[in-house]
Amino acid sequence: MDDVFVTRHGARLDNGPDRQAGWMQKFGLPRDDAPLSPHGETAAMELAARMAEHNEEIPIAHVVSSPFIRCVQTASIVAQTLSLSVKVEPGICEILSTFPPGFMRPEEAKERFGAAIDLEYEPVVDAGSLSPEFSDGQAATRAARAASKVRENLGGRPGILFCGHGASCLGIVEAFGGCGYIGYCSLSRFARQVEGRQWSCVGEQGDVSHLSDKRTSLNSAF
C-alpha cells in the first residue's frame, strides 16, 4: 500500500494565539518567513507524537517540507522524532504573492535553527524557476504537481509526510484524493492499495484529535 501524510505548519509568530510584536528584529527574518510561535512548537511536538504512532504501523521514510522556516521547523520536530532528516522542496512553498520568495536556503535554515536538513536531496522544482502567483489556485496547482512528482521519485512505500501551507496543502491533498483546506498541524492520510488505482483518504482529512488546542487548528483551515 502507498501511504502519504499531509500536514500544515504550526501557528506562526506573527499570526496566532501567542503572536509577538518585534519578532522581525529578534530573528532578522523577512516579513513572509515568520518562525513558529511557542503555540506552534507545542502543536508540532503533538503532531510528531502522532506520527510516531503511525510509524509503528507504516514506516515513514521521508519528511518533505516547504522551504519557509515555519514549515522547516514543524517538519524538523517530526523528522527528529522519527530519526529522519527533512527534504526541502520549493515546489510546495507558500503562494508567492510577494517576489522574490523570502525563504532561506536549506544550509541557512540548518545553521540558524538547527533544523535536520537533508542537504543531498534534489528538489523537483528549482527555487529559481518559481514565478509570482496571484491566487491560492495557482499555488495549489503548482504544489499538486510537485508533490506528485516527489512521490513518484521517492516511491510510496514506506510512507511520506508533506508539510506545507494553506494554499500549497490545498493542492497536495487534491493530488492524493482529498479536497479543501487543512489547519495548523492537522494530519491527513491518503492511501491506495495498488499502483495506478485512485487515492483515497484514510480516516478524517485534517484530523486534529492529537492536538491539545483543536480550535486554533480548525479556525486556520482556510
Image (cartoon, rainbow, N blue to C red):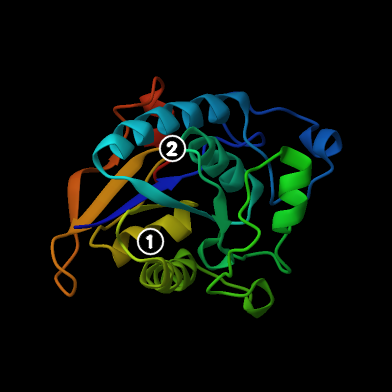
Q: Residue at x 19, y 52 (%)?
A: 201
Spot occupied by residue 204 in the image (x, y as percentages of width and height): 21, 41
From the top left corner, tell me how far across and down residue 113 is, in percent. Answer: 72, 39
Badge 1 amino acid: Ile
78 w.r.t. 148: above or below? above
Q: Is residue 119 visible?
A: yes
Question: Image height check: is 2 above or below 21?
Answer: below
Q: Secondary structure at mark 2?
A: loop
User: Is the N terminus in the top left, top right, bottom left or bottom right quadrant?
Assistant: bottom left
Q: Say whether disc 2 or disc 1 marks the residue closer to the N-terminus.
A: 1
**Mark 2 closeness class: few <14, some 14–19, many ≥20 residues within 10 Å:** many
Quarter-of-image position of residue 41: top right
Q: Which residue is mark 2?
A: 185
For this rendering, which residue is in front, 132 or 113? 113
**Residue furthest bottom in the image:** 129
- Looking at this view, is 96 or 77 the one in front? 77
Left or right of 106 on screen, residue 71? left
Q: Position of residue 193 (x, y in %)?
A: 13, 61
Identify the mark at residue 172; answer none if there is no mark. Answer: 1
Q: Amino acid at mark 2?
A: Cys
Q: Position of residue 189 (x, y in %)?
A: 27, 48
